[in-house]
Amino acid sequence: MNILETKNLYFTYPDGDQRKIILNEVNVSFDKGKFYTILGASGSGKTTFLSLIAALDKPERGEILFNGEAIEKIGYEKYRRDDIGIVFQSYNLIPYMNSLENVMVAMSITDNEMEKDMKAQALRILESVGIDENKAKRRINRLSGGEQQRVAIARAISTNVDVIIADEPTGNLDGKTSEMIIDIFKKLAHEQNKCVIMVTHSEKIAAESDVVLKLNTDTQNFEVTS
Amino acid sequence: MKQWKRAFKYLYTHKSKVLLLFITVFIVGNLFMSALVIHSSSMNMEALFKNRIKSTVILSDKDVSIDDRLDLYDKEAVAADYYNRLSIYETLVSEYHPLYSSLEVDGRNICLNKPNNSCYYFFGVANSDFFELHENSIEITEGRSFTEEELKNGSPVAVLAKDLGRGNFFENDISNFQVGDIIPFSIISYDGKKVEYPVEIIGLFDISDKLSDENKYPLYFKSFMPYKAVTKQYDIQNELNTQNNPIKYSPVQLTFRLASDNKMEEFLQRAETLCQSTRLQIFHSDAEFKKVQRPIMAIRSLADKQFMICTIALITIISLLVILFLEERKHEIGIYLALGERKFNIIVQVLLEIITVGMLAILLSIGSGSKLGEVISNKMLEVQIQEDAKSGANELNPEGIDLEKLIEMYDYSIEQDTVLFMMGICFIIILFSATLPCCYFVNIIPRKVLMEDL
Ligand SMILES: Nc1ncnc2c1ncn2[C@@H]1O[C@H](COP(=O)(O)OP(=O)(O)OP(=O)(O)O)[C@@H](O)[C@H]1O
Ligand SMILES: [Mg+2]
């Protein structure tokens, strides 16, 4: 069974007096253990799609199934808390906390089982994305963009979720850092059996993924290539 | 990271916002507390007065003709029967030397019992359990009070303050009275005729320690006799003075302490008919109370308005500040929502922050606010008293309640109940005015704040 599946997903935005269709009856599915990339022109609706499968907003029509169950039934809040991790293009870390605290906030919110020593666990996860203890205790605004992005990734994976959604996580990063992050995602999919869905503009990164979904602006639908 | 940890982290890292919230709440808290102090102290004051002049009727005039006075005494039996706790005083200056000196003690004119020029104030009483005795202001520690027989016959017997003659109060110790001693009074006419009027001491009293010094002093110079013995002295003096100027008037004050409040109406009607033929003035506790109550009430109604305004101000300020702060924190709230945090927990975090700062400000405003209330209240009282003085409402008050003394009598000490009330009310206001905006902000759609507002 697919871990994540969309059924006739439909979403529009107001455009003047009319409504502009962004997603038109989208049916796609995602499996565990695979690294997905989503490509598409700017403004095609990639971010919109991610925010729907991340339950940050409601689709106008259609539904999203997680392990065969509609997320509306699971409860949007609970679904976000226990089933998915999100990495935003703009990091979205809590500015008045340090990296460690940002990760620990997510860990304390989820109902998923965490280790007894949450702090040690958080430090280990941060270490795995290349944030050492010194940096972990630094305020967010004293970290570079790449470091903040890695903290955001650490936060997304810290809650032991099966699905990780990332919106252009490498957009602001140099080639080397970006490669390292792609590496992390690949490992998450292939070694830890997660389902990783990532939006990117880079064909090169897309080539490294298992499945590429291209959002077509004309049909407002995906073209899937493996 | 539990909510309270997050809340304190936020407060710690947003000191200017904390300060802004703290200062505004502190200012309103001061006004709030001062209103509360004025209100509660005026309530205490009212209770104090009600208690003090409870069911008391005082008939008083400085110049009452002796005939009128005697007329009153005739009716006294009726009143006594009807109102079982009754006492009648008559103030009389009895001289056994034509000269008497006076001394100022605590602003009062007091006659001294010096050997060569002495005078005593004798208060005629109609009851063995007379007023002071009944009120426990004095206690007869040597000897006894009057018998019914002595009261009926107007026997020349007296009860004096023990310290009056024992030099404990003044340097000149002259009499050193004992029970059984006879004071050799004589009544002297203007043309020098003299009639012996010896008075026997049957009791000596101690003054209660519970009284304030101010209330104690007059008692040192109060001596009690059966009222008929007092009027007899007048009669003798008038007999001696027939050709010249008979004493027609003497100060009279009758105090009736009623057994119960409900008899007031009925008694006042009686007293009025009683006083129609005389020029006696009736003071009764209701009227007296209203007189003192007037400035208190005026101040209280102002305080109540201040209280209302403060409540509205606190609600408005907290709501606006919370809206302002949350508007800025939309993004943060969006992050919490995206992480799947329960809306309730987000509200709890914000409330913890607001309540911590707000209640701290309120707590600190209790001390300064009550001081402020004291200052405001005293200022307002002064204004009220001046207005009363102008309008003539501030008359002699026979119970000794001087409006000027009102300020001194005001008790501004804050009771635990007031503090708890203040904390409770403010807690509810802060909780109420912070919760509503919170509820609005946690219902934002996270996509909108996280994806659009950047
Ligand atoms: N609130 C909104 N109201 C109206 N139109 C919107 C709104 N939000 C987004 N859009 C439009 O919807 C389209 C899809 O936006 P979206 O952010 O999903 O694109 P995207 O594929 O992520 O683009 P990019 O690659 O530039 O990030 C865009 O044309 C955008 O202008
Ligand atoms: Mg986008």
Image (cartoon, coloured by chain):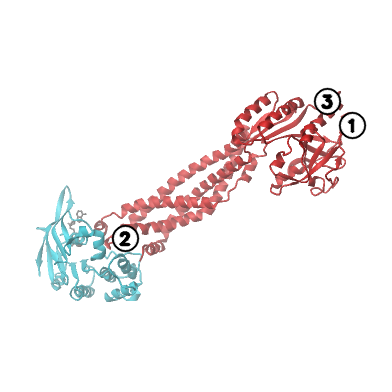
Can see residue B181?
A: yes
Front residue of A51/B44: it is B44
Disc 2: which residue:
B332
> Callout 1, which amino acid?
Lys
If you read the primary sequence from the N terminus, does the residue marked by circle 3 or circle 2 appear first?
Answer: 3
Which marked residue is nearer to the observer: mark 3 or mark 2? 3
How far is disc 1 from disc 2 in space, using C-alphas?
Answer: 103 Å
Disc 1: which residue:
B194
Element marked by disc 1: strand
Disc 3: which residue:
B245
Element marked by disc 3: loop
Q: Position of residue B454 (x, y in %)?
A: 26, 59
Quadrant where the C terminus of chain A is found in the figure: bottom left
Quadrant containing ligand 1:
bottom left
> Callout 3, which amino acid?
Asn
Q: Chain of mark 1?
A: B
Can see residue A45?
A: no
How far is disc 3 from disc 2 in space, using C-alphas?
Answer: 98 Å
Which marked residue is nearer to the observer: mark 3 or mark 1? 1
* Residue at left offset 51%, top offset 41%: B302
Q: Which chain is cyan?
A: A
Q: Is residue A32 left or right of residue A122?
A: left
Q: Position of residue B101 (x, y in %)?
A: 82, 39
> Callout 2, which amino acid?
Glu
